[in-house]
Image (cartoon, helix red, strand yellow):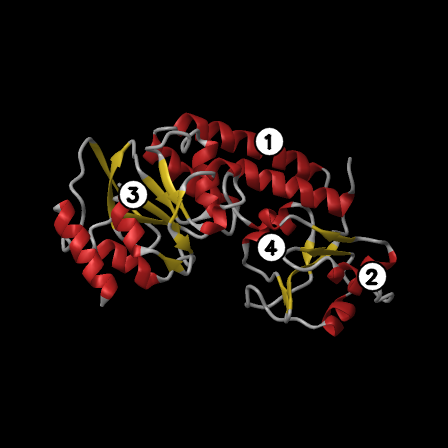
Amino acid sequence: MQILKFILLVCFLSGCNLFSSQKPISGVVQEITDATGVNVRISIPIKKVVSLSCGISEGLYALGKGGKEDDVIAVTDDCSHLPQVKGKECVGSKGNISIEKMILLSPELVLSIDGEIPEQTITNLRDMGITVFVLKQCVGMEDVQNNFRILGTITRTQGAVELNIAEAKERMDAVAKRMKDPKPRVFWEIGNKPLTAVGRGTYVDTIISLAGGENIVSGKTKFPYYTAAAVVKNNPDVIILSNVPEEESLRWKQIELLSASQNNRIYQVDPGLMNASTPLAMAEAVEKVSKLLYGAQ
């Protein structure tokens, strides 16, 4: 009730219409369908953007946006590790976006990734007249390219987008030429309590495949719980760890039955490799994983 009173007071003082479906848009307007099926009208080039995804923030900065105060005006706390966002307003965490801050900031556009923000939060923002565009959650390179092209469209930086895509393709083609059969078998752990693995149909699974590896985890669950016994049974050539304590490496090294342990092929990697932001960032992730699988060539 207190939040509702605050919202009504802000709207009264600012003269906004709480129940309008969209804010008035001036300039060149383009209507684009987002990942939720909503047709969103966007004034291009856009200003005053709030990014609710680290990947989106990185994408906007890669396109030269965000440096000016009226470009990216706010982010979420999962972007705090990015040096570019220093001094930017924070609107909360992905699971707890501050509606009050959003209203006070009065963004022209809020960008999010499908599945990262609660649907009710998106609905609440739209009901208050805030324009929200939801991009698709990335699994493959095509998804990353499509999202990046959308960012290029709304920022009028299509030329930079295509250069990024072309360079990424060239670099990944070079990785593909270094692949060998049989492909190294990979177990990628992203949680240790409980033991959680990267499954099929995920962005990281795509990275493994493009890097020339074979994910030992099968099934339809994207991030299944696993057991040490199952890892031993499938005996991966390489174990990759992210978002887990460094002691987890020691635990696997102590299981001498594992090929990865015998050959000292257990690696800790930056969790940032798991996030899709730009085609070039994806290409870099593929290159780094490929070096773990095949060594520097």
Q: Which residue is mark 2?
A: 253
* Residue at the (83%, 67%) spot, across then down: 255
Distance from Cα at disc 2 to Cα at disc 4 = 23 Å
Q: Nearer the viewer, mark 2 or mark 1?
A: 2
Q: Amino acid at mark 1?
A: Glu
Q: Mark 2–mark 3 contact, CB under 8 Å?
A: no
Return the residue at label 4.
205
Q: Which tag, 2 or 4, sits closer to the chain's start? A: 4
Q: Amino acid at mark 2?
A: Lys
Looking at the rendering, in which quadrant would you find the C terminus?
top right
Q: Which amino acid, by three-letter code, is at mark 4?
A: Asp
* In this view, 224 is above or below 85: below
Q: If you read the primary sequence from the N terminus, does the residue marked by circle 2 or circle 3 appear first?
A: 3
Foreground label between 3 and 1? 3
At 63% across and 57% down in the image, what residue appears? 243
Q: Return the mark for residue 109.
A: 3
Marks 3 and 1, the one that precedes in the sequence: 3
Q: Can you say whether 51 is above or below 251 in the image?
A: above
Q: Nearer the viewer, residue 214 or 264?
A: 264
Report crowding for label 3: few under 14, some 14 to 19, many 20 or more residues within 10 A (C-alpha): many
Of tags 2 and 4, which is closer to the observer?
A: 2
What's the CA distance linking mark 3 and mark 4? 32 Å
Residue 88 visible (yes or no): yes
Along the line of sight, the residue nearer the viewer: 248 or 161: 248
- Relative to 267, residue 163 above or below: above
